[in-house]
Image: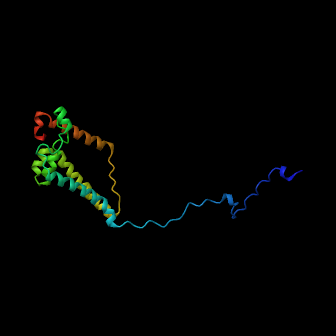
Amino acid sequence: MDASASPAAPDPAPVPGTPGPPHTLPAAAGPVSAPAAPVSRLRRLATPVGAMAVVVGAFGYVATVDPNEPGHYPVCPMLRFTGVFCPGCGGLRSAHAVAHGDIAAALGSNALAVVGYAVFAVVWLLWMVRASRGEPLRIALAPAYWWGVGAVLLIFSVVRNLPFGSGLAP
């Protein structure tokens, strides 16, 4: 009988404590890299500082180009086509007043926008503190909070368009 026709002999049983055949060795996990170098504080603060620079630039532009004068900014499409104030109507006038330090006029133009500016300031400060410590900014709000924000925007929009809520209209 020919040796090539004989059935293959089974592999011998592995002996405990000895490595198996080369094909059963674990594969390498890939190249081993050195641990990442710590990120400098300046680099961690670059993003929140950049975001604030954009906001300051936008407020600076609105402070110099008065939205109370017609023709400088487009009219709100909702106000133009329906005659109804949206939750953002008066927001540019509010930002202009805040940039000039007139909080009373800002509240009169859009009180909800002023609250939004304050919320942004608090979140930005939290972002700066966490970034300086090397921690990520994670603000996870439950869906109920987002529904609450939507409800506040809707109620604000409805009330400012009714006769008794004219104090909220811009």
Residue lying at the far right in this picture: please name it: 1
Q: Is residue 112 left or right of residue 47?
A: left
- In the rendering, at what x and y percent does residue 112 appear? 18, 45
User: Which residue appears at 37% of the width and 65% of the height?
Assistant: 39
User: Which residue appears at 31% of the width and 42% of the height?
Assistant: 144
- In the rendering, at what x and y percent does residue 12 appear? 76, 57
Applied colour scheme: rainbow
- Place residue 47 in its image quadrant: bottom left
- In the rendering, at what x and y percent does residue 131 appear? 32, 61
Q: Is residue 46 left or right of residue 24?
A: left
User: Which residue appears at 34% of the width and 54% of the height?
Assistant: 138
Q: Is residue 26 left or right of residue 79?
A: right
Count of marks overlaid on the render: 0
Q: Nearer the viewer, residue 17 or 94?
A: 94
State the quadrant of the C terminus.
top left
Q: Nearer the viewer, residue 54 or 125?
A: 54
- Is residue 111 depicted above or below 138 in this figure? above
Residue lying at the far front in this picture: please name it: 71
- In the rendering, at what x and y percent does residue 126 appear? 27, 58
- Place residue 17 in its image quadrant: bottom right
- Is residue 56 depicted above or below 75 in this figure? below
